[in-house]
């Protein structure tokens, strides 16, 4: 017979207190979890608020040009919220302004690794490359900014990035690349008169006066009273060698708004129209006389440059100037021909090319008529 008796049953009602205790424990755990989450949320909000306040202070100081004072609050904002790319980019901006490019490079690498197609990040990277004189890298980042992603108002941001790139190309005198960027910008400028004026001026800087003239004509067609556009058209026509058209444009500008600044341009055009040997209406004698005047100006200009830097004249230059002196000393012909005029112009062009090779082109007011006239002759411009 077994000595082990049956298991004693739990006293009646014992199960309910145990279940109640479990429920209480579960409620306590849930409450503690909720409290922990609440406290974490409060702490996170406090951190975010502190970061936001530091950021706003730093951004305000940076906007005032006080990069040194902006640095600490921007660093604090970045330290509190390292995942906030806006805080990081403004910190990089302050570092760039202060020349602390090493620290900026490290932060920039992290941003671009996480967001390689971000338009704003690439724009800041372009500015950093400029600060480091890495111009090719800067151009590459500007292009990424132009074609990168922007969270809002992407067209405006992309256009602003392209204009920064254009400024770089202007500063570097990269005319071919500049023209390419301006042609793209031209397709986006339709209807924006302020941008079109800026674009037309930049086409002149890029040595594309025909494109500049086309934009200025569109502006004058839209607003015939726009003296600024007429003056711009005059400059473009002047660079193209279209002197009479330029004179007409400057007169329209002057009529719409009398401006003493336009008078020197009108005086210059008077000189050019009296000097230009290309109009088809000229008689052979008049063309010959103008050719002699141009030859005399080219010779005198070159001699003045040589006098300012003694010892630069070589035998070829001496011979060239002697040839010009001999031509200018000849008795006037009874009957000049077109071939005789072309001979004098050819000699003037050779002198001008030699002068450019040795001294470059001057931008002095006194030389401007000769420079413009010679540029027209060398480019084979059509008759004015």
Image (tube, rainbow, N blue to C red):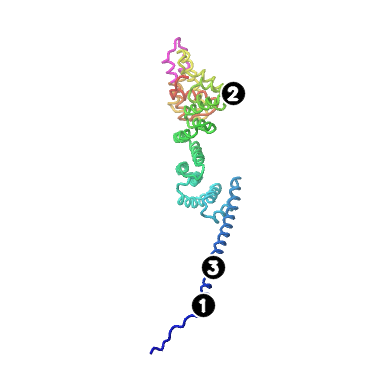
Q: Residue at x 43, y 26 (%)?
A: 316
The residue at which mark 2 appears reads as: 256
> SS for tag 2?
helix
Q: Are marks 2 and 1 in contact (CB under 8 Å)?
A: no
Marks 3 and 1, how far apart at CA: 21 Å
Q: Residue at x 43, y 18 (%)?
A: 342
Name the side, left or right, on which 55 lies relative to 109. Answer: right
Q: Residue furthest left?
A: 1
123 or 282: nearer the viewer: 123
Q: Specify the principal SS of the magenta part.
A: helix
Marks 2 and 1, how far apart at CA: 105 Å
295 or 317: nearer the viewer: 295
**Residue 126 point in image, percent of width and height:** 49, 44
315 or 227: nearer the viewer: 227
Q: Residue at x 44, y 83 (%)?
A: 7
> SS for tag 1?
loop
Q: Are marks 3 and 1 in contact (CB under 8 Å)?
A: no
**Residue 218 point in image, percent of width and height:** 51, 27
> SS for tag 3?
helix
**Residue 149 point in image, percent of width and height:** 47, 45
The residue at which mark 3 appears reads as: 27
């Amino acid at each position: 017979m077994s000595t082990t008796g049956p298991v004693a049953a739990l006293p009646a009602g014992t199960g309910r207190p145990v279940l109640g205790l479990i429920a209480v424990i579960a409620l306590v755990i849930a409450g503690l979890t909720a409290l922990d989450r609440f406290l974490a949320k409060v702490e996170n909000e406090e951190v975010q608020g502190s970061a936001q306040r530091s950021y706003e202070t730093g951004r305000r100081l940076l906007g005032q040009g006080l990069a040194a004072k902006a640095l600490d609050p921007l660093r604090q904002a970045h330290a509190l919220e390292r995942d906030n790319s806006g805080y990081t980019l403004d910190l990089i901006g302050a570092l760039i302004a202060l020349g602390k490019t090493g620290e900026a490079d490290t932060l920039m690498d992290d941003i671009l690794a996480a967001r390689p197609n971000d338009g704003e990040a690439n724009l800041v990277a372009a500015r950093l490359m400029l600060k480091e004189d890495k111009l090719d890298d800067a151009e590459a980042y500007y292009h990424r900014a132009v074609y990168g992603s922007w969270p809002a108002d992407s067209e405006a941001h992309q256009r602003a990035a392209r204009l920064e790139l254009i400024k770089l190309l202007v500063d570097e005198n990269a005319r071919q690349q500049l023209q390419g960027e301006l042609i793209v910008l031209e397709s986006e400028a339709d209807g924006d008169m302020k941008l079109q004026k800026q674009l037309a001026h930049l086409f002149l800087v890029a040595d594309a006066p025909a494109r500049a003239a086309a934009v200025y004509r569109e502006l004058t067609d839209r607003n015939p009273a726009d003296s600024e556009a007429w003056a711009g058209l005059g400059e473009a026509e002047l660079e193209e060698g279209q002197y009479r058209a330029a004179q007409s444009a400057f007169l329209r500008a002057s009529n719409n708004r009398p401006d003493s600044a336009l008078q020197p341009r009108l005086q210059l055009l008077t000189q050019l129209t009296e000097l230009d040997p290309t109009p088809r209406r000229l008689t052979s004698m008049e063309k010959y006389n103008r050719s002699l005047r141009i030859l005399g100006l080219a010779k005198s200009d070159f001699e003045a440059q040589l006098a300012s830097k003694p010892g630069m004249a070589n035998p070829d230059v001496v011979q060239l100037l002697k040839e010009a002196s001999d031509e200018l000393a000849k008795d006037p012909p009874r009957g000049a021909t077109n071939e005789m005029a072309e001979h004098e112009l050819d000699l003037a062009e050779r002198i001008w090319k030699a002068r450019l090779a040795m001294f470059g082109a001057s931008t002095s007011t006194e030389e401007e008529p000769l420079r413009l006239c010679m540029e027209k002759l060398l480019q084979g411009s059509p008759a004015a």
